[in-house]
Amino acid sequence: MGKPEVLTDLDAASTSTSVMKKLPEVTLAFWIMKIAATTLGETAGDLFAQTLKLGYFLTTIALFLIFVVTLVVQLRSSRYNPFFYWTVILSTSMAGTTMSDFMNRDASAKFLSGGATSLGWGPQGLGLGYPVGAAILISILLAIFLAWKVSGMTFQIRDIVTFRGETLFWSAILVSNTLGTSMGDFLSDSSGLGYAGGALLVIGVLAVLVAMMKTPAVPNVLLFWIAFVLTRPLGATAGDFLTKPVAKGGLDLGTAGSSAVLLAILFGLMAYAQVRERRATGPRSAEREPVTQRAG
């Protein structure tokens, strides 16, 4: 019997060995890197928008353009490359942070600290609030999944190898990370749970999802997407816990210092994933037993 995995069996048929995979296997290491990337996305997004005072509007435009560039690199790649893949995840996390802030916040004193009256050039934010912003994002995400379903493309990550499939996947990822930011900010700022309490709540829900993996009535592919959304608010609350003032329940490490440390951690994990991928696809990989024969 193989090693236990965490939300890995997405109810998929075995991947054909004749098709080069473009996306990673969903293992425990995947989730660790996802949380690291989303936490960095929170601190880096706040670094540009708030600490450097570029504002949500300009920062959102800049980070969305970075997302497009990293996505083009990923789509043009002929095979899975951990650096390409996780750079896109990071860019969606950063862009999702400021997109969420721009949708939900405004120029009121609640969001502008230190007596500031503005934050960067352009609109300060739409001021929709977390519930309305989350409802809009959920609607967009459901629309993407509906289009995905109608297209007949697989929802199973390890079987996504086409340009159209990847486009749908990354669209869902961007909206998921934006939605997750809204949820994280709501838990941290408006729910009364605080940063640590919000993080503990999300961890508890994720533990329930892991337990539900053994429940045949719930498809693992559904559990994956729920977990993917929820790891974003976990990263958001963790990022806020690292950067916010002690008076607000944070550690006051600052956005710059926290981002630098998290970037070093994520870079190290990406390098480790790159080494493992090279070993897995090296000369000896052809001698291994085909995936289709191991399915039983």
Image: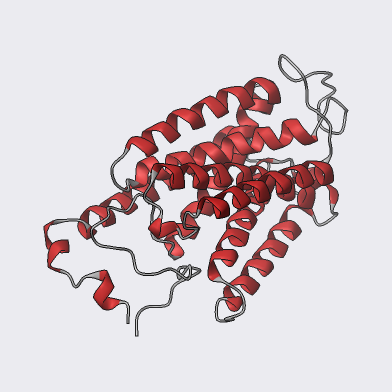
Rendered residue at 49%/28% (across/down): 66
Give the camera-side residue of 233 and 148. Answer: 148
In this picture, residue 15 sits left or right of residue 286 = right
In this picture, residue 273 sits left or right of residue 168 = left
Q: Is residue 43 above or below residue 123?
A: below
- How is the protein colored in the picture? secondary structure
Rendered residue at 46%/60% (across/down): 156
Whole-percent x and y of residue 7? 50, 68
- Is residue 204 something that shows in the picture? yes
Whole-percent x and y of residue 220? 54, 70
Q: Is residue 77 above or below residue 31?
A: above
User: Which part of the image, by quadrant, shows the C terminus?
Assistant: bottom left
Whole-percent x and y of residue 42? 62, 40
Give the camera-side residue of 267 and 68. Answer: 68
Judged from this view, the residue extending furthest toward the bottom is 1
Judged from this view, the residue extending furthest toward the top is 121
In this picture, residue 129 sits left or right of residue 214 = right
- Is residue 53 something that shows in the picture? no
Rendered residue at 27%/57% (across/down): 276
User: Which part of the image, by quadrant, shows the N terminus?
Assistant: bottom left
Q: Is residue 204 above or below residue 190?
A: below
Whole-percent x and y of residue 86? 43, 44
Give the camera-side residue of 282 and 162. Answer: 162
Q: Is residue 229 above or below residue 256?
A: below
